[in-house]
Image (cartoon, grey):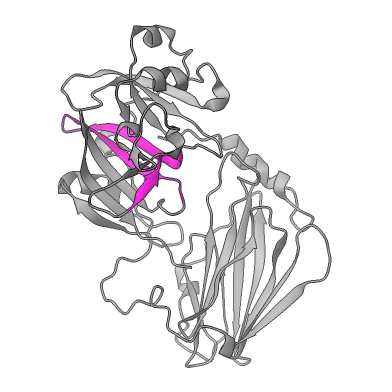
């Protein structure tokens, strides 16, 4: 359950801008790829759209021309997927732009990093090269690709000094096919779709997935609580005693599926060090009567059941009162990963009379994973583990 400070996202683009970026409330970076069939050259440049979102090009612009003797040009953004063109009739170029998440906190949090990857003849010649965003000290001037080399040119973001370029010859670059991008396995889930890694309740696992495409026509399936369970719990958000540390919610909820709904408190820190959720069985009447003037210290000190902290590990031992909850992590039996509490979000919901939590992390290593857990007095059952297939860069 996330509560975002939207005003921060809209304002920082102007604060983070350097001389080459005019002040604006909204900046969209995009790469223009121009393929010259006669010269066997592709040139990639950086552009930006300010104040208004950039309208997406038709998907067919990014698809390979049927006639390799024709020039081709297309734009790429962070969610547009790859674009392909001919360097020669027999050698293809693929380019792809990626973009990080905007955050309502931290230096340049609202100016996410933008990067570019380039493949030539299915070999990765440029991997997640930072081209803009995140208050970059250098931004992309141009990249020129031929079958023989790749030339990468950047210029300083904070001045108008001349560009600097580096050149790598084909012999210096990877010679093996990138099978992560060009899979030889038929039937693999494409990026943006959701793969079911484990399902104890197939109906529920299907109910949390919405199949849809994004504005660029690329798969962008969404994972959320079932439609008939949305917006019903923990919606009264309050600042608590110390608003800087995060906000609080409360509601009646059967947090351990014991059959008895009880008062539960949600703590929702939102800062660079701790962007997460934690849910607490009420410590008692003193906290209930103090609402909304409560603190996380009251909850951690007095709650007998904390989800998911009560069932995580802090170091090599179960988390306890003496541990820093931000340093703990939760693991799963049916998927080999541990997710830190520091950036773990949980959304509680009720389905068919039982209580569940939908988990998703903001950690870059785990953001693709979703889990539906059914809590019980001694732990939790793993109901669904879902993997949103990430793009490769």
252 displayed left or right of 250: left
Residue 193 higher or lower than 116, as above or below:
above
**Quadrant position of residue 389:** bottom left
Residue at 72% from the left image edge and 63% from the top image edge: 138
Question: Given the current orientation, which residue lies at the most extreme front position?
Answer: 316
Residue 281 higher or lower than 145, as above or below:
above
Give how far across and how far down residue 162 sits, in percent. 82, 71
Q: Magenta segment: does it hold 347?
A: yes
Give how far across and how far down residue 196 sits, in percent. 24, 55
Front residue of this view, candidates 112 and 320? 320
Residue 271 higher or lower than 391, as above or below:
above
Q: Quadrant of the N terminus?
A: top left
Give how far across and how far down residue 283 sits, in percent. 34, 15
334 displayed left or right of 391: left
Residue at 31% from the left image edge and 40% from the top image edge: 358
Say whether residue 91 is visible: yes
Residue at 33% from the left image edge and 34% from the top image edge: 308
Residue at 67% from the left image edge and 47% from the top image edge: 13
| Numbered label tally | 0
Front residue of this view, candidates 208 and 362? 362
Residue 314 higher or lower than 332, as above or below:
above
Magenta part mainly helix, strand or loop? strand
Say whether residue 276 is visible: no
Q: Magenta segment: does it hold 353?
A: yes
Bounds of the magenta segment: 337-363
Give how far across and how far down residue 188 sits, in percent. 29, 69
């Amino acid at each position: 359950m996330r509560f975002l400070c939207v005003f921060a996202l809209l304002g920082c683009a102007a604060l983070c801008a350097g001389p080459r970026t005019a002040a604006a409330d909204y900046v969209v970076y995009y790469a223009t790829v121009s393929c010259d069939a006669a010269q066997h050259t592709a040139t990639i440049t950086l552009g930006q759209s300010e104040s208004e979102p950039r309208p997406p090009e038709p998907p067919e612009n990014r698809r390979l021309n049927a006639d390799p003797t024709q020039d081709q040009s297309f734009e790429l953004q962070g969610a547009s997927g790859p674009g392909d063109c001919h360097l020669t009739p027999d050698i293809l170029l693929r380019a792809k732009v990626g973009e990080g998440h905007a955050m309502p906190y931290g230096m340049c949090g609202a100016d996410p990093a933008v990067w570019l990857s380039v493949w030539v003849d299915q070999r990765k010649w440029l991997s997640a090269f930072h081209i803009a965003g995140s208050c970059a000290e250098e931004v992309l001037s141009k990249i020129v690709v031929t079958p023989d080399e790749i030339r990468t040119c950047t210029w300083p973001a904070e001045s108008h000094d001349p560009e600097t370029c580096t050149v790598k010859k084909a012999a210096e670059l990877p010679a093996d096919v990138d099978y992560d991008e060009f899979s030889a396995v038929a039937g693999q889930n494409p990026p943006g779709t959701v793969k079911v890694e484990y399902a104890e309740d197939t109906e529920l696992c299907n109910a949390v997935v919405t199949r849809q495409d994004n504005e660029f026509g690329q798969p962008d399936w969404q994972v959320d609580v079932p439609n008939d369970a949305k917006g019903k719990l923990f919606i009264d958000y309050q600042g608590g005693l110390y608003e800087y540390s995060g906000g609080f919610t409360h509601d009646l909820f059967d947090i351990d599926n014991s059959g008895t709904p009880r008062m539960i408190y949600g703590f929702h820190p939102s800062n660079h060090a701790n962007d997460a959720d934690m849910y607490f069985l009420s410590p008692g009447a003193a906290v209930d009567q103090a609402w909304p003037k409560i603190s996380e210290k009251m909850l951690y000190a007095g709650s007998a059941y904390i989800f998911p902290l009560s069932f995580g590990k802090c170091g090599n031992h179960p988390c306890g009162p003496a541990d820093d909850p931000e340093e703990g992590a939760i693991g799963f039996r049916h998927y080999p990963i541990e997710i830190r509490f520091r950036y773990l979000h949980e959304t509680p919901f009720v389905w068919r009379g039982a209580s569940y939590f939908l988990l998703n992390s903001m950690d870059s290593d785990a953001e693709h994973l979703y889990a539906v857990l059914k809590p019980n007095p001694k732990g939790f059952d793993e109901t669904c583990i879902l993997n949103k297939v990430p793009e490769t860069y």
